[in-house]
Image: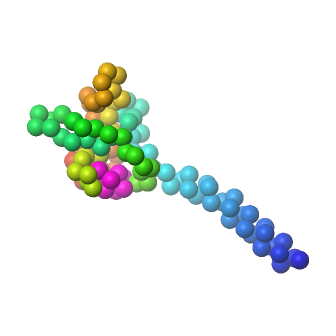
Amino acid sequence: MKLLSSIVIAQLGVAWALPSQLESRIYVPCTNNLFDTAYRCTNDVLGGYIDCQTPPITIISAADFQNQCAWIGKLPLCCIRPIIGTLPILCETPPGLGPFGDK
């Protein structure tokens, strides 16, 4: 009976610790208050950004954000949320990535 109690208590301890470990692993790509929205965009010939989309799945790291974007031929960006229309006007590279999404 003591063995069963010990196993149950150990399992509850693992279940209790697991959510906090997952929460600490969530990556927030856009920490700037102004450039607060993550986008995957295509660069146009004039230096602006077109065909922007928000990432459809949770981003777990800067490298993951870069890979999600590269997979579909886009750049990882943090942009000002558009007020009119759907295209962001000003964007910057997310923290942890270089000027063109390079690490």
What count of labels does the image hold? 0
Q: Is residue 47 above or below residue 64?
A: above
Task: Looking at the picture, tell me which residue is in the foreground, 75 or 31.
Answer: 75
Residue that lies at the very extreme toward the right in this rendered image: 1
Q: Residue at x 78, y 67 (%)?
A: 9
The stretch of residues the image draws in magenta is 62-69
Q: Main secondary structure of the magenta part?
A: helix
Q: Is residue 80 magenta?
A: no
Quadrant of the image for the C terminus?
Answer: bottom left
Q: Quadrant of residue 11?
A: bottom right
Q: Is residue 68 magenta?
A: yes
Quadrant of the image for the N terminus?
Answer: bottom right
Is any part of residue 92 visible from this angle?
A: no
Q: Residue at x 84, y 72 (%)?
A: 5
Q: Position of residue 70 (x, y in %)?
A: 26, 54
Answer with left or right where residue 12 lies relative to residue 74: right
Answer with left or right where residue 66 lies relative to residue 29: left
Q: Residue at x 87, y 76 (%)?
A: 2
Q: Position of residue 53 (x, y in %)?
A: 32, 40
Residue that lies at the very extreme toward the top in this rendered image: 84
Q: Is residue 12 above or below residue 55?
A: below
